[in-house]
Amino acid sequence: MDLLSSLRQEIAGLDFAQALHKTVSFLRKNVAHYNWVGVYMLEGDELVLKAWDGPEATQHVRIPIGKGICGLAAREKRTVIVGDVSADSRYLACFPYTKSEIVVPIFKDSTVIGEIDIDSDALHAFTERDREFLEEVAALLGERYG
Ligand code: SME
């Protein structure tokens, strides 16, 4: 079975909060270059961390929509891939070992309601395959919201 179908099966029957927790741990466990996985949900003009899985907690549990790669993806309503975070001045540093990042908005009825944020310890870890896969994961979460 492909990963998306497995995830769909794993979160069937869970409420939204449980589904977020299951999703972050599933992604981290099943994809080697997904070293830290979080889901932020939009509350007013802030992104609030609702679920995460990784080696350690981030200090960025609330991110204003104007800040970081997370804020950028929410503001511009598009997936943002940063191949080398050390070369991007918009990046908000969480962990010293993070080298690249992908942030994928979660939509409900064309409105951004949150996002999936993944850090990798490898440079240029995220490709178009990750974008396509994670946009499908985000769509799955969007369907399950509300
Ligand atoms: N790096 C993110 C902040 C969140 S941490 O990666 C968990 C950013 O630039 O918005």
Image (cartoon, rainbow, N blue to C red):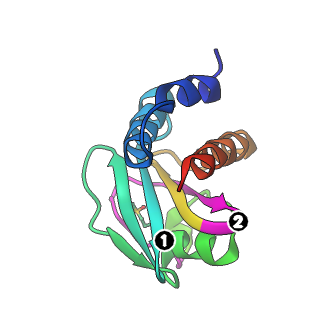
Instruction: Answer whether residue 81 is visible to the viewer in this image.
Output: no
Dot 1: element = strand
Looking at the image, residue 31 lies above or below residue 24 = above
Q: Is residue 66 magenta?
A: no
Q: Which residue is mark 1?
A: 42
How far across and how far down the image is residue 95, in percent? Answer: 33, 59
Q: CA distance from mark 1 to mark 2?
A: 15 Å
Say which of 68 and 13 sits in front: 13
- Classify the position of ligand 1 by quadrant: top left, top right, bottom left or bottom right: bottom left
Say which of 16 and 133 sits in front: 16
Instruction: Answer whether residue 129 is visible to the viewer in this image.
Output: yes
How far across and how far down the image is residue 10, in percent? Answer: 48, 26
Does label 1 or label 2 sit earlier along the sequence? 1
Neighbours of disc 1 within 10 Å: few (<14), some (14-19), many (20+) = many
Tag 1 near tag 2, CB within 8 Å: no
Dot 2: element = loop
The quadrant in which the N terminus is found is: top right
Q: Which label is found at residue 120?
A: none
Amino acid type, mark 1: Leu
How far across and how far down the image is residue 41, in percent? Answer: 46, 64
The boundaries of the magenta stretch are: 89-112
Q: For marks 1 and 2, give the one nearer the viewer.
A: 1
Q: Which residue is mark 2?
A: 78
How far across and how far down the image is residue 61, in percent? Answer: 32, 68
Q: Residue at x 36, y 51 (%)?
A: 51
